Image (tube, rainbow, N blue to C red):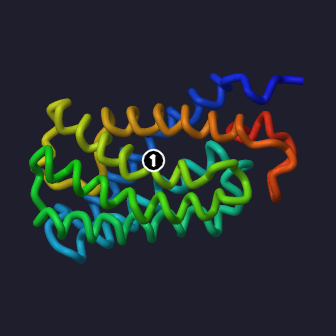
Amino acid sequence: MQDQHRFNTKAWLLWTAGFVAFIIGGALATGAVGRINDAGSALIGGLIAGAVIGTGQWLLARRLLGNPQTWIPATAVAMGIGLAVGAWVVGYGTSLGELALMGFITGIPLGVAQAYLLRDRLANAWVWGAAMPLLWALGWTVTTVGGIDVDRQFAVFGAYGAITFMALSGVLLDRLRAATTPSTPALDPGPTKVMAQ
């Protein structure tokens, strides 16, 4: 039997590959609403991108994330709200500082919603919630520093930021999984394989 405390490299690589969902979600949001330059475009763009990102995450870690009817809509709504508030707070600006702050604010409702859904599946799920604002801010920072044309006011950061986000969140997810004992309430069977299918 595999040691559940050992880092699951295969599951981490699979989770990291989910960065593609950010690219697809961002493209669909841009196609639907164009630039994120007002409350309506931010809310709808966030809902669209969040639904795709949530779907991607669920497909890659469905045994851990549970019911798609809760994870996907919760991620979509939380991102829509977070992006609408975050973009408004920074006046729809696209400087490095503005995008980092927008990302931080976007990550707050995302972290709260996802941590709530993970509360019976992961030990210390609150750590996931606390990390989301930081990781979303980092995603925008990496994308901006990477030279992406962020002045086009995208709904979500690009490939550089998405890879960074998924790689780091995958490490965190694995460590939270490793800290979770089989006796944790509502934990799915097979705790050594909760990230990968």
Secondary element type, mark 1 = helix
Work out whether residue 131 or residue 196 is closer to the camera in this orientation and state it: 131
Q: How many marks?
A: 1
Quadrant of the drawing holding the C terminus: top right
* Tag 1 residue: 131
Residue at 30%, 47% (x, y): give it.
Answer: 137
Quadrant of the drawing holding the N terminus: top right
For residue 38, which quarter of the picture? bottom left
Q: Is residue 16 above or below residue 80?
A: above
**32 displayed left or right of 153:** right
* Residue 33 percent coordinates (x, y): 24, 67
Work out whether residue 9 or residue 186 is closer to the camera in this orientation and state it: 186
Residue at 63%, 49% (x, y): give it.
Answer: 124
* Residue 89 percent coordinates (x, y): 18, 67
Q: Is residue 48 above or below residue 59?
A: below
| Residue farthest right in this picture | 1
Work out whether residue 131 or residue 46 is closer to the camera in this orientation and state it: 131
Amino acid type assigned to the residue bearing label 1 in the image: Ala
Residue at 29%, 41% (x, y): give it.
Answer: 158
**162 displayed left or right of 67:** left
**87 displayed left or right of 174:** left
Residue at 50%, 55% (x, y): give it.
Answer: 129
* Residue 146 percent coordinates (x, y): 20, 30
* Residue 34 percent coordinates (x, y): 20, 62
Q: Residues within 10 Å of mark 1 (few under 14, many from 20)?
A: some
